[in-house]
């Protein structure tokens, strides 16, 4: 995977994510519903990007948040957007290169695992997650949906296509983001892995309770509410789901 591909669009990615609203309206509320509490918990945010979810967590009384991204521009953006706070420690590194300090209660991996360049790397990513979790600890993250990896329209400002033509385990997926007039903003590539490949990689790493969760429409209002309909339609076309697993209790 091209490690530098997130340097160039760091600001554009951050702005576009805020403009489209899917992070705040769908992704983060869906995730937060699945995590019982951050209070007093140590949290590792892998592939933190501009740190938007780290900042959400930092307001929920964690004991500490360590946020890691391979892109220097993303980490610079995260530090700029975070201002003067002391809870989050940002590290510019490959997530798999950070040294094992103390195991964490929770590891977040939002759009992380599908950047593994190969199935062997996916296994390494999962091993690294397991190594850095306390027994029983939770791994959870937004992820490509392995049963719906592509969508053939650019509705909602993103087109998702298979670069290799045919979808197969470890094929390359390109996500292209567009502005509200349909002009391309930027694109980036990642891998698609079969559902079984994710599940096996996590289990072989000492994780159990591997579960896929659907995005949820948390918008209030009745069925006629235009925004609720907008987000219901977004979810029905989305290529994103949520993956969670726990570290085995008897695994050291
Ligand atoms: C689509 S962005 C998601 C960022 C953030 N998690 C979010 O949800 O907005 C993917 C991020 O993964 C980072 N990344 C990809 N592979 C990585 C790795 N091996 N270690 C650390 N960061 C990685 C990229 O630099 C990029 O910032």
Image (cartoon, rainbow, N blue to C red):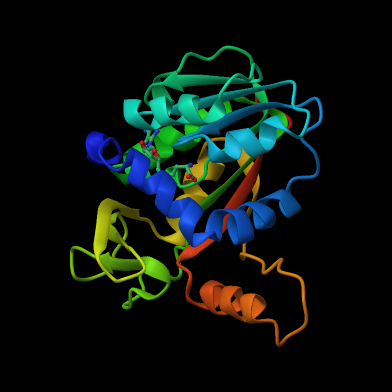
Q: Quadrant of residue 72?
A: top left
Residue 47 x/y as whole percent = 45, 35
> Observer-nearest residue: 215 or 212?
215
Residue 156 x/y as whole percent = 43, 71
Ligand 1 placement by image quarter = top left
Q: Quadrant of the N terminus?
A: top left
Residue 177 x/y as whole percent = 32, 60
Residue 237 x/y as whole percent = 48, 76
Q: How many numbered marks, from 0 up?
A: 0
* Visible residue check, residue 40: yes
On screen, residue 151 versus residue 98, left or right, reads left
> Observer-nearest residue: 120 or 151?
151
Q: Residue at x 38, y 22 (%)?
A: 93
Q: Residue at x 47, y 44 (%)?
A: 201
* Visible residue check, residue 149: no
> Observer-nearest residue: 141 or 39?
39
Where 220 falls versus 54 (above or below)? below
Q: Quadrant of residue 10?
A: top left
Q: Quadrant of residue 155?
A: bottom left
Q: Residue at x 52, y 34 (%)?
A: 51
Q: Residue at x 62, y 66 (%)?
A: 214
Instruction: Residue at the far bottom: name it.
Output: 224
> Observer-nearest residue: 76 or 189?
76
Q: Quadrant of the C terminus?
A: top right
């Amino acid at each position: 995977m091209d490690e530098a591909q997130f340097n160039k669009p760091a600001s554009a990615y951050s702005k576009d994510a805020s403009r489209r609203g899917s992070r705040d309206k769908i992704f983060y509320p869906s995730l937060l519903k699945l995590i019982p509490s951050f209070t007093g918990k140590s949290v590792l945010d892998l592939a933190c990007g501009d740190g938007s979810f780290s900042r959400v967590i930092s307001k929920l009384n964690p004991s500490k948040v360590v946020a890691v991204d391979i892109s220097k521009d993303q980490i610079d953006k995260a530090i700029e957007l975070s201002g003067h706070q002391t809870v989050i420690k940002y590290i510019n590194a490959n997530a798999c290169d950070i040294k094992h300090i103390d195991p964490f209660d929770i590891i977040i991996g939002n759009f992380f695992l599908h950047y593994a360049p190969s199935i062997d790397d996916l296994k390494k990513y999962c091993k690294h997650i397991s190594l850095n979790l306390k027994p029983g600890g939770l791994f959870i993250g937004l992820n490509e949906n392995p049963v719906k990896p592509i969508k053939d329209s650019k509705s909602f400002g993103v087109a998702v296509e298979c670069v290799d033509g045919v979808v197969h385990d470890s094929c390359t997926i390109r996500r292209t983001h567009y502005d509200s007039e349909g002009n391309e903003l930027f694109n980036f590539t990642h891998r698609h892995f079969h559902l079984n490949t994710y599940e096996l990689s996590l289990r072989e790493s000492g994780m159990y309770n591997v579960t896929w969760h659907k995005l949820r429409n948390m918008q209030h209002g009745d069925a006629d509410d235009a925004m609720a309909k907008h987000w219901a339609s977004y979810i029905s076309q989305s290529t994103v789901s949520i993956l969670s697993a726990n570290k085995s209790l008897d695994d050291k």
